Amino acid sequence: MKDHPAPHDPAPHDIDGNPVTPGLPMAMLAEITHRCPLACPYCSNPVELTRAQAELPAEDWARIFREAAELGVLQVHVSGGEPGARRDLAQIVASARNAGLYVNLITSGIGITRARLDELDRAGVDHVQLSLQGIRPDMADRISGHPGSWDKKMGFADWVTEIGFPLTINAVVHRQNMDRLPDMVDLAERLGARRIEVATVQFHGWADLNRAALMPTREQAAFARRIVNDARIRLRGRMVIDYVPADHHAIYPKACMGGWGSTGLNVGPDGSVLPCHAAPSIPGMRFENVRDRSLSDIWHLSDAFNAFRGTAWMAEPCRSCERKTVDFGGCRCQAMALAGDARATDPVCSKSPLHAQVVARAEEDAAADTADFIYRRMKKGG
Amino acid sequence: MDPLIAPGDIPYLPRGVRLTDDHVRGIRVLQAPERAMQLDPIGDAILSELDGARSMAEIARDLAARYKAPEDQIADDVRDFLTGLIERRMVFVKETP
């Protein structure tokens, strides 16, 4: 208890003081580092990146994984940045398995040699998720900002299947690569992936800085939907296709995190615990740190986790909406970014009074005549 | 929906898919890539039979005998349950050697 004294919460309550009942988390995202050889312009890490010297040591991660398992977490997603940027990745993975967690490794495949992948196999990685920025070197290397990334990634994918890990391809799609989605699905199939996750860029943080270069057109969003639907039928029983659609073109918002503070939590490189990776974009939220307080206390008692639990905090049109327990009013961070109020209905929802404005802005961005990126980089000096 | 498995096929849990106890919630779960699925006692009973050696028909026969249930009905239930998991790539199938 150094810098962050624990508040004395009498009982869990939401942002408006209504009582809430925390459930149990299923999954934890462990962003063990923000360091990454790639510079993708839609990176989900915060714009203010954590430096190497502020990263938690492996022993702390071992404790967090034990606390997470006791709290009810079943799966951990070991991610970054690029988790391979940490020399002690295998030790971190082994401690997660020892805690009884199912370990998903979320990687770009860059910077992990065959020998290290064998080491990660022995450490107990259950499943590998490999990111895909595009198809072929020209596109993939430009989007990732890393010359040679495509060739390294394809080599890595071969090692994954040689060792026998289950493989998921995570294809992040946007205006500059969405037309090649059929090729991405074919590639995943050729690599022997059990799953492909087709995730349209979510416009937070870095991606928001690059809206004009990344926003897909309405036609592209419809095209992607059609490709996904066709592929699901064609590949039934051979490959699973998970799809995160372009929500700026949707009727209803996505059920962000399956509901705030309901099933998942993120732990950042420095030990800060977040309800979702974009949560720091909401001003006034205070996030606690596993260096100061147990994961269980943070999950059950912290103001940040309780802020938007349940449905009592909602305003209209959410309050009287029959979908309020389906999509939970959408994304709080998007409500903050687009409506200037984290309690508002996610403006991508067609019932939001701001919907028309949001769609107009998305169409304007989609029509922008730029392909130039602001790449994700750490600021100089560290 | 077409079944994705024939009676003579051998269903098995591939690498990366495991049956585990959830001690916190007191339930049985099937853990798979980025998925954890709660199992009811029937699902648990079926998946616990998957040994990579017996065919689906043999498993259904054994379960019918153990639970003193009609074999046809058990065979249909097992086929439908496994087809759902094969669609999700949580159960794999090989042909009888």
Image (cartoon, coloured by chain):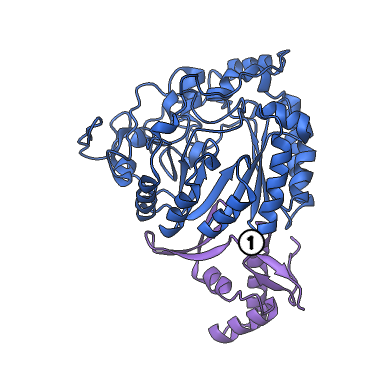
Chain colours: A blue, B purple
From the viewer's perspective, is A91 left or right of A64?
right
Camera sees residue A62: yes
Q: Is residue A59 left or right of residue B81?
A: left
Give the residue displayed 25% in from the left and 31% down from the top. A4
Residue A378, relative to residue A158: is it above or below?
A: above
Q: Is residue A134 above or below residue A114?
A: above
What residue is drawn where x is 64% and y is 36%?
A199
Q: Position of residue A37 (x, y in %)?
A: 59, 32
Label 1 lies in what chain?
B
Amino acid on which disc 1 is placed: Leu
Q: Is residue A13 left or right of residue A316?
A: left
Residue A281's spot in the image, x, y percent? 44, 24
Residue, x 37% and y 35% (percent of image)?
A272
Location of residue A235 in the rendering, given as x and y in whole percent from the top left corner: 76, 52
In the image, A159 versus A166, the foreground residue is A159
Residue indicated by mark 1: B85
**Residue found at x 74% / y 56%:** A238
Q: Position of residue A198 (x, y in %)?
A: 67, 39
Is A176 located above or below residue A8 in the figure?
above
* Side (left or right) of A71 relative to A170: left
Q: Residues within 10 Å of mark 1 (few under 14, many from 20)?
A: some
Q: Secondary structure at mark 1?
A: helix
Quarter of the image holding residue A350? top right
